[in-house]
Amino acid sequence: MTLLLDGHKVQGKNLKVTANLRIESGDMSGQTSNTDKAHKGFKPKTLTVSLMIPFVDKSQLVDLMRLAEATAGGGQLHLYRVVNDSAEVFGVRQVEFSDGISAREDDSLRAWLVQFTLSERESNPEKVEGRRAGNKVNAQGAPGSAVGDGGGATDASSDNPALSGFEKVLGRVDKWLGGSEPK
């Protein structure tokens, strides 16, 4: 089994990757024995990696620590493109280190037993949720004019209320340049 992070092979022996998808749900039974659950969505998929690095190959552990401590602009954790069979099956493409990294010495094996977790970022469900249209909010209205309206304002906003703020500004500039706006 191989694990590549941005093309860097994670070195070690007995590499094992465990993929996990957590499905959040909430109990809707209240004080009854009902078994209804509310689906609260899918949480980011994780890859738990365990491997062994012999003491004589300590440079492999140094390289792994360098990958774990890498940051991007703004101090955010570095986002890695991952290549691994388990990650591919679970649809995981981009990950970052999460929940820490541990290296426990095993004297009988003369090696470090290393374990760390990679958490999915920018998943397909996350992208779909971001593109999903939000619930439309209806504006509340009442008879009469709005407070502070003044009753008779004649600016570009009253010409066409369907225009965006930027378009209204452009309309004012156009009128001013064309000479139809009083100076």
Image: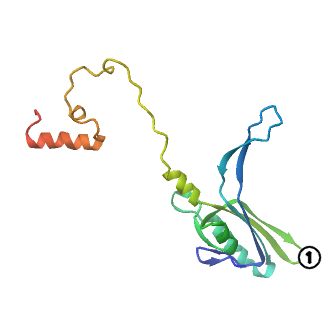
Task: Say whether residue 68 is left or right of residue 36.
Answer: left
- Above or below, comparing residue 52 to residue 120 in the picture: below
Identify the residue under disc 1: 108
Q: Which residue is drawn at 80% across and 79% down?
A: 54
Q: Which colour scheme is used?
A: rainbow
Q: Position of residue 94 (x, y in %)?
A: 59, 66
Kind of element beneath mark 1: loop
Quarter that holds the C terminus: top left
Task: Say whether residue 78 is left or right of residue 181.
Answer: right
Nearer the observer, 63 or 170: 170
Nearer the observer, 133 or 43: 133
Task: Say whether residue 93 is left or right of residue 46.
Answer: left
Q: Which residue is drawn at 68% across and 72% down?
A: 64
Work out whether residue 122 can be spotted. no
Work out whether residue 9 can be spotted. yes
Q: Where is residue 19 in the image (x, y as percent from the top left)?
A: 72, 65
Q: Residue 140's image quarter?
A: top left
Q: Which residue is drawn at 68% across and 75% down?
A: 85
Q: Which residue is situated farthest in the right direction here?
A: 108
Nearer the observer, 105 or 47: 47
Quarter that holds the N terminus: bottom right
Q: Which amino acid does label 1 sit on?
A: Ser
